[in-house]
Amino acid sequence: MNRDPAVLLQTVQRFRFVAFFVLVIGAGAYLRFHDLGRSQLWLDELVQLMRAHHASVWACLLDIGNDIGSAPLDYLIQRAFVSMWGVTPWTARFHAAVFGTLSIPMIYVTARRLFSVRTSFISMVLFSVYPLHRYYSQEGRNYALFVLLTLVSWYLLLRLSEKTEAKVWVAAVVTNVLLLYTNDLGVVVLAGQSLFAIGAALMKGAGQESSLSAKRYWKYVALSWAIPFVTFLPWILGTYRHSLSDFPNLFSDPYLIVRVFREISGGSYPLSLGFGLCLLLFLVSVRSREDRVRAALIVTGGLLPIVVVLLLEWYREYFFAIRHILFATPFVLVAVAFGISRIPSLFRNGSTGRAFQASILSLLVVLSLGTIGLHRDKNPADWQGLSDYLEQKVKITDIVVAPDIDRIIAYLCPDIGKRVRGRDALQQLRPAVPAEAGDGRVLIIKSIYMQAAAEALVNQLIEAGSGEVADKQALKGFQVIIGKTVR
């Protein structure tokens, strides 16, 4: 038996490494799977589920193409799970929780290509409890898969910068095709990688660890850009929509920067402030050539995409939600982790510096867990309550007018689906003399999801026929008005 103290120490260190690695991933998995089916599906989840739940894959693809900025991969994956296990909130979200969990070790191996073991571990710890990623790992949408594929794509880029391998080239091309077919913002990811590749190639011999060379990067750019883009081009040409109506100018919101600052952490000002200070420490710590390569990764992978997404949504007259920039947040957290790793260098006493470093990391973890606890219930509307109410109330002679949510109501309430109408039906309604009880009723559903034009029409109709309103029912996010009007 080998009793060499050096070998024993190495074995113990390896065991501690593996144990900590598994512990962090386990904790992150628990946070993503715990209470996965607890809350109701919300609007975007219902829209995805409805589009993925057709009788054939072809019908599914045609419907997905009608949604602005949609890409089909996540829909098809979700379709497979709900086909096997049935339609429930848990099954609709299961794939997102799996992809969210897989992203935890992926951020480590990606960061490890340019950063130290300590920085990579801190990145993984922060990401495992990151409230924003945990939240979207519990949503039946494409965001968790998009984050995972973004990390895989960057990992392959960094790996190719060190050694050219045919199998890695193929993996990079396949990953980028999947990336684009998960979310059309994959174009922003590839654009950021291209800028990083060009910048790194211009920094001749920027670092020994990266072994950056123009030849390797230009091969990657040529292959991993051209083939995926050509593959994705038919889809984007067939489904592209420039804008949606009724959305205000993105930059007209004076609190946009404040919103981004608060929501980047999952809705906590203290946690966002902690991230911001560590990010600032990262920026002031950039000194060496290799640090400049690391900074280029953070800028092109994290900070620049945030700005680009805001500009794209302004151009497309689209609304902004923090989930649109979720794919860039892993690189922000890597920068935060790098800033934390530099804390001991600020102290003359190494042990004091390490203790302060551990305190900062612990504080960020506690704030993250607290934010998760405070934002457990975020359902803006009671869809289940609405569907139950309609199933009980709607009679065979009734018409249900649900502006902007008519297809979802028809999906949730298949028994009354043929009597559900959309916004166009509002133009055909008029106040009239009350009919006999139960004859010719119209149920109008006002919702928080109505666009401004539809809301104005509903309000005008209700005001004009206010004396003929038979009943009102308020539910979370909805108001059902039953009127004795005729068509």
Image: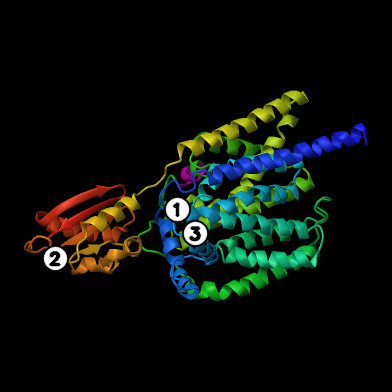
Q: Nearer the viewer, mark 1 or mark 2?
A: 1
- Disc sitting over residue 440 in the figure: 2
x, y (%) of residue 374? 46, 36
Looking at the figure, which quarter contains the N terminus?
top right
How crowded pointer 3 is (Cα within 10 Å; few <14, some 14-19, many 20+) is rated as few
Task: Give, as a single range, the part of the protein colored magenta.
Answer: 256-261
The image quarter in which residue 223 lies = bottom right
Q: Is residue 101 above or below residue 458?
A: above
Looking at the figure, which quarter contains the C terminus?
bottom left
Confirm or deny contact between disc 2 and disc 3 (CB under 8 A).
no
Q: Which residue is mark 3?
A: 85
Earlier-in-chain disc, 2 versus 3: 3
Task: Look at 74% across and 50% down and name the residue there.
Answer: 293
Under mark 3, the amino acid is Trp
* Front residue of this view, candidates 5 and 116: 5
Earlier-in-chain disc, 1 versus 2: 1
The image quarter in which residue 410 lies = bottom left
- Disc sitting over residue 342 in the figure: none
* Front residue of this view, candidates 90 and 344: 90
Q: Nearer the viewer, mark 2 or mark 3?
A: 3
